[in-house]
Amino acid sequence: MALLLGSVIGIERQWYQKMAGLRTNALVALGSAGYVAFSVMAGGGDPTRVAGQVVSGIGFLGAGVILREGINVHGLNTAATLWCSAMVGTLAGGGYLPQSALAATLVVATNILLRPLVRRLDRRVLTATDAETYYTVQVTCRAPEEAHIRALLLHALSGGGLGLRQINSEDIPDFAAGGMPHPRGAQLQ
């Protein structure tokens, strides 16, 4: 049952030429079912603990299909579908066949029925207020002036409606000449 239902999920993925298609989803569901069934057959195992380990293991598999290209991230839905295929297999392996079939139906329906809505939302034109921009500011100053410079920058950032994500301060060795105090670099993001 897990193999059949994982295949149904995989056919939808393969049809739309996604990274993880028919074989991957079928194998994820089958493997999940096998691990849960084994723990039930072994008698001493706890199927809920095995299910928890399946969830953790699928996280590694899902991470392998997520790609980052610049600011764009691809493969999140594929990873989520693999996670759901594992859930379908876990239910089947635990003997919950009707629930497994319902779960598989919901996974496929979600991927098919929400696709047009996602495309429509993705075509929406973003305004400048919808996008988030990150800036890095690096200031180099002498150690005694660091607190004052930091205060000025924080005041300017808050006055300009900008948020501060990170602040670093470090000594810059061998920068000072002629016995002058060492300057410090403060990097604000």
Image: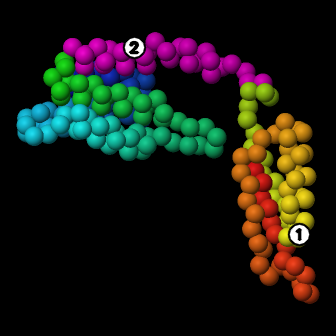
Q: Is residue 151 left or right of residue 117?
A: right
Which dot, 2 or 1, sits closer to the camera?
1
- Measured as percent of width and height from the top left, residue 100 is found at 25, 19
Q: CA distance from mark 2 to mark 1?
A: 63 Å
Res. 67 in view: yes
34, 182: nearer the viewer:
182
Q: Is residue 163 left or right of residue 146?
A: left
- Measured as percent of width and height from the top left, residue 85 is found at 31, 28
- Measured as percent of width and height from the top left, residue 76 is found at 48, 33
Quarter of the image for residue 43 reads top left
Dot 1: few (<14), some (14–19), or many (≥20) neighbours within 10 Å?
Answer: few
Query: Is the stretch drawn in magenta largely helix, strand or loop?
Result: helix
Q: Is residue 63 left or right of residue 68?
A: left
77, 129: nearer the viewer:
129
The tag on residue 144 is 1
Quarter of the image for residue 31 reads top left
Dot 2: few (<14), some (14–19), or many (≥20) neighbours within 10 Å?
Answer: some
79, 136: nearer the viewer:
136
Residue, x 36% and y 15% (percent of image)? 106
Judged from the image, the secondary structure of the residue bearing numbered disc 1 is helix
- Measured as percent of width and height from the top left, residue 103 is found at 31, 18
Residue, x 14% and y 39% (percent of image)? 45
Q: Amino acid at mark 1?
A: Pro
Q: From which residue to which does the magenta span run? A: 98-127
- Residue for badge 2: 109
Q: Quadrant of the N terminus?
A: top left
50, 23: nearer the viewer:
50
Res. 22 in view: no
Judged from the image, the secondary structure of the residue bearing numbered disc 2 is helix
